[in-house]
Amino acid sequence: MEGRPAVDDAALGRAALAVLDANWTGVSTMPAPGVYPHQWSLDSAFVAIGLARHDTARAGQELLSLLAGQWRTGMVPHIVFHHAGGYFPGPSMWRSAEAPDAPGGTQTSGLTQPPLHAYAVWRVWQQAADRELAARFVRLAWPSLVAQQAYLETRDVGGAGLAAIVHPWESGMDDSPAWDEPLATSEAGRCGDGYHDRYFRLAVLCRDHGYASSYYRDEHPFAVEDPLFNGVWLLSCDAMARLASEVVGADPEPFLEAAARIRVALLDRLWDDAFYARDVRTGRLVPVCTIGGFGPMLDPGLPRHVVEALTSLLESTRFMGATGYPVPSCDIRAPEFDRGQYWRGPSWISTNWLLSRAAATHGLDRLSEILVASTLRLVRQGGFRECFDPFDGTGHGCRDFSWSAALTLDLLGR
């Protein structure tokens, strides 16, 4: 990163802020107007992280508007709808108003997403210039974060300490090949059509069974322990402990104990020379290595030999060593790899950012610097695109994508 003119950073930062301003609705940030015109859970966490050092009030508003859609179970939904149209499946499919635990007056989806929110709240607190404003925000968000942690424990379908996702849309990596095998053996996958149709049928099953935790535990055909989802959960447990002790005046020990349980379960359940997703219904690890397998590196307490093995894999010709624009979202040697298909090959600013954070957490400064520099090179070359070709850096999907802009701000702040 040395040698880049500072004016380039300043111009890129202004452009990123302009994207976030253009996508701002007055209460939250759309991922991309016209394509994703509502509020998405994981996207809002990334937006808040990007805004943390620039605008404490707006970063806080981003998360509080999302948490206003939280269900009484503690579930933070993956979409909060601010109007009826513009996206399918919309409110008429999810029918959240018919669910007894859904929030009154707010239409949402019935699924969740990786629980990055406590970590995002921690980052807002950590970087805020106005400490009083930030402390008020943390205290407002705290009860919702505690409820979210309790809800995630109800997702321990396998009984070993990990939260199971019950739909690919909950993963944040919607079309990943890690879901192909579990979906093919499920009730939703018994017909021969494409996986997006299967995704829809699976969502209908969730809806028709009232989004009930008891249904997910005992009957729902799709239950997968995902290393990225659980790595993010562990990261947020650590953030909860910090917030408890530094801001809220609560006992941090329950959150540290939760992080330790997740760490043990990740290694016991998902580790086999790399981290893989586990199909809870069949008991098998899904034999495809994806970007999600690096999620547990977010854990500062991950054993050193595991960190070293993951770093070797990440830098190998299966991932960074073979592409000019790391990191591809799937092992390029896997038969499922497709450089043009969402989450089956392209590089994403979000996962690059997570891995740069993970590398820094373990003192892998050279790797972190490479990830930061290469990610900034992507956006300088192709703009704030939704994702990028891992070999030539060509942008794909939406332009002016909010999480790409927001995380660029954070990377520039390094």
Image (cartoon, rainbow, N blue to C red):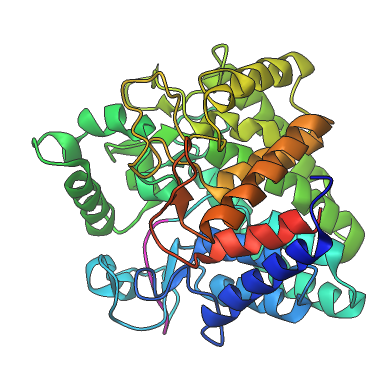
Between 382 and 42, the one nearer to me in the picture = 382
Residue 152: horizontal and vertical position, in percent?
A: 55, 48
Residue 231 in view in this figure: yes
Between 351 and 287, the one nearer to me in the picture = 351
Q: Magenta region: which residues? A: 105-111
Task: Inspect the magenta stretch and tell me whether residue 168 lies in it.
Answer: no
| Residue ID at (56%, 61%) | 403
Q: Is residue 46 above or below residue 68?
A: above
Count the labels in the image. Answer: 0
Task: Determine the image quadrant of residue 194.
Answer: top left
Residue 151: horizontal and vertical position, in percent?
A: 54, 53
| Residue ID at (41%, 18%) | 333
Residue 216: horizontal and vertical position, in percent?
A: 36, 43
Furthest-bottom residue in this view: 26
| Residue ID at (80%, 68%) | 53
Q: Main secondary structure of the magenta part?
A: loop
Task: Determine the image quadrant of residue 66.
Answer: bottom right
Is 258 left or right of 106, judged from the image as shown? right
Residue 64 in view in this figure: no
Residue 409: horizontal and vertical position, in percent?
A: 70, 62
The quarter in which the N terminus is drawn is top right
Task: Inspect the magenta stretch and tell me whether residue 109 lies in it.
Answer: yes
Q: Is residue 295 above or below residue 313?
A: below
Task: Determine the image quadrant of residue 320.
Answer: top right
Q: Is residue 235 above or below residue 299?
A: below
Q: Is residue 314 above or below residue 192?
A: above
